């Protein structure tokens, strides 16, 4: 049974309250750093830490008047802190807090995504083990090609998701940066030592060289990595959709008791989860384009990126989170039909074994052109014919029987000939 899915983890990271909490976290870390270096009284910092708070509704109320979110936030915090509040935001510009806090949100979001990516890895790995020897037809251009196993198909998915896992580890290092360097990033009113101490307290690294903002190539990288994950999930979902077609029906999404597929047609069992994932991938991918456009800001900063990021970061993170949970449940509960796979593999009398016959004839001394013409003649005679049988036609062709014995012909139609090296791939992936 597939459980209904909610978004408590990721959704909470992108609420207004959580955002303001990260702003306050940054402000306090800077105050602590200033105190450690003797620039502000330690007693004042303790008072700030004890009293500092905010009310999201009050912040919005102030913002409606001052038209500046950071000023509204600081005004509200100072209503709680009192006189010691004069040490808050000392020497800072708004982007010091905004960008450093955003780094905290993005790192926290990756920390939510990573375990779900691991869950997907384990689900695919387990399904690949189960179907290690489940023979099916491989397809290219949507057309039957040569035998493979369903487990081998899943091995390809596993390798792809493992690459995403490595990318996320690198991405966490890339995005876990802050900047406390003031207007245009020159440290005119604050020391680099403050930045270093504050960032360390927050679990971040100081940006190598910031302008008034952290350069948006980091953020574009972030969204592109999420878009890549979404693209892989879409690839898996599209494959499931194709394999669930009525005339293929090699796999099928789990269909729950009481579930209905159509308001008009009671027989329908539609791949709705895979279709939903395909649509969501389009959204995440579109955000990658917007993130790339955010890289080119005017001079040391403008705020053209800000309105975009208020949409793309929560949306991309929440969508990717949802997609990972959905595809994991889909893989775990996927219905697999080996009998249908065998039926599809052997249609038209095993015409998909044509290359094995071709190679066997070449091995017996025919040149490639001769062998190809002989095999293609029987293959095309069998292809898409109600009674077409490639095996029988080949077995009756003098050009074949003069070169190959019945046993040698039978060997060409043994799917195990195509699978003998797949174990190496399984060993590489530790399946």
Image (cartoon, rainbow, N blue to C red):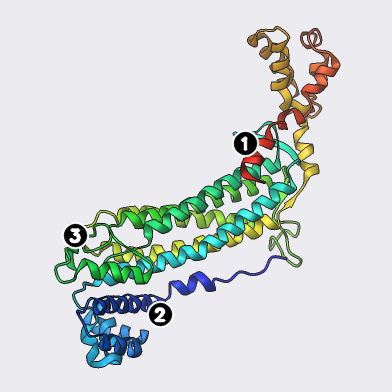
Indicate left or right for 195 with 335 as reference.
left
Q: Do the residues labelled 2 and 3 touch (CB within 8 Å)?
A: no
Q: Where is residue 374 in the image (x, y as percent from the top left)?
A: 71, 12
Look at the image and tell me whether residue 18 can be seen.
yes
Task: Give how far apart the Cα atoms at labels 2 and 3 are.
Answer: 29 Å
Q: Of 322 and 271, which appears nearest the observer?
A: 322
Label 1 neighbour load within 10 Å: few <14, some 14-19, many 20+:
few
* Residue picked out by circle 2: 17
* Mark identifier at residue 142: 1
Q: Residue at x 70, y 51 (%)?
A: 127
Circle 3 sits in a helix, a strand or a loop, which is it? loop
Q: Quadrant of the N terminus?
A: bottom right
Q: Where is residue 133 in the image (x, y as percent from the top left)?
A: 76, 40
Task: Give how far apart the Cα atoms at labels 1 and 2 are.
Answer: 49 Å
Q: Of 45 and 325, which appears nearest the observer?
A: 45
Circle 2 sits in a helix, a strand or a loop, which is it? helix
Sequence-wise, the earlier of marks 1 and 2 is 2
* Mark identifier at residue 300: 3
């Amino acid at each position: 049974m597939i459980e209904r899915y909610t978004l408590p983890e990721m959704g909470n990271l992108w609420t207004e309250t959580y955002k303001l909490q990260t702003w306050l976290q940054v402000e306090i870390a800077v105050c602590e750093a200033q105190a450690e270096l003797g620039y502000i009284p330690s007693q004042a910092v303790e008072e700030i830490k004890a009293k500092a708070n905010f009310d999201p509704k009050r912040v919005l109320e102030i913002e409606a008047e001052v038209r500046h979110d950071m000023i509204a936030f600081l005004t509200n915090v100072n209503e709680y802190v009192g006189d010691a509040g004069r040490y808050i935001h000392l020497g800072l510009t708004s982007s010091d807090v905004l960008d450093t806090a955003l780094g905290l949100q993005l790192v926290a979001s990756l920390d939510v995504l990573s375990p779900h990516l691991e869950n997907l890895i384990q689900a695919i790995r387990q399904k690949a083990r189960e179907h290690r020897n489940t023979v099916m037809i491989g397809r290219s251009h949507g057309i039957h090609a040569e035998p493979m196993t369903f487990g081998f198909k899943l091995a390809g998915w596993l390798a792809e998701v493992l690459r995403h896992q490595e990318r996320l580890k690198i991405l966490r290092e890339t995005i876990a940066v802050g900047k406390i360097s003031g207007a245009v990033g020159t440290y005119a009113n604050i020391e680099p030592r403050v930045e270093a101490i504050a960032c360390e307290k927050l679990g971040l690294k100081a940006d190598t060289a910031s302008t008034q903002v952290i350069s948006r190539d980091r953020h574009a990288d972030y969204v592109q990595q999420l878009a890549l994950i979404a693209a892989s999930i879409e690839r898996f979902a599209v494959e499931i959709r194709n394999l669930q077609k009525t005339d293929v029906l090699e796999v099928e999404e789990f269909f729950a008791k009481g579930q209905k597929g159509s308001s008009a047609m009671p027989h329908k069992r539609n791949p709705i989860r895979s279709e939903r994932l395909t649509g969501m991938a389009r959204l995440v991918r579109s955000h990658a384009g917007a993130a790339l456009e955010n890289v080119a800001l005017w001079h040391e900063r403008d705020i053209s990126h800000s309105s975009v990021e208020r949409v793309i970061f929560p949306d991309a993170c929440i969508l990717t989170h949802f997609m990972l949970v959905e595809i994991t449940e889909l893989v775990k509960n996927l219905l697999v039909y080996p009998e249908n796979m065998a039926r599809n593999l052997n249609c038209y009398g095993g015409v998909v074994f044509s290359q094995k016959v071709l190679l066997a004839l070449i091995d017996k001394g025919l040149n490639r052109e001769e062998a190809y013409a002989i095999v293609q003649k029987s293959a095309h005679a069998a292809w898409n014919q109600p009674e077409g049988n490639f095996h029988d036609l080949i077995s009756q062709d003098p050009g074949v029987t003069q070169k190959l014995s019945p046993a040698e012909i039978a060997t060409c139609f043994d799917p195990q000939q195509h699978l003998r090296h797949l174990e190496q791939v399984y060993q590489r992936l530790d399946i």
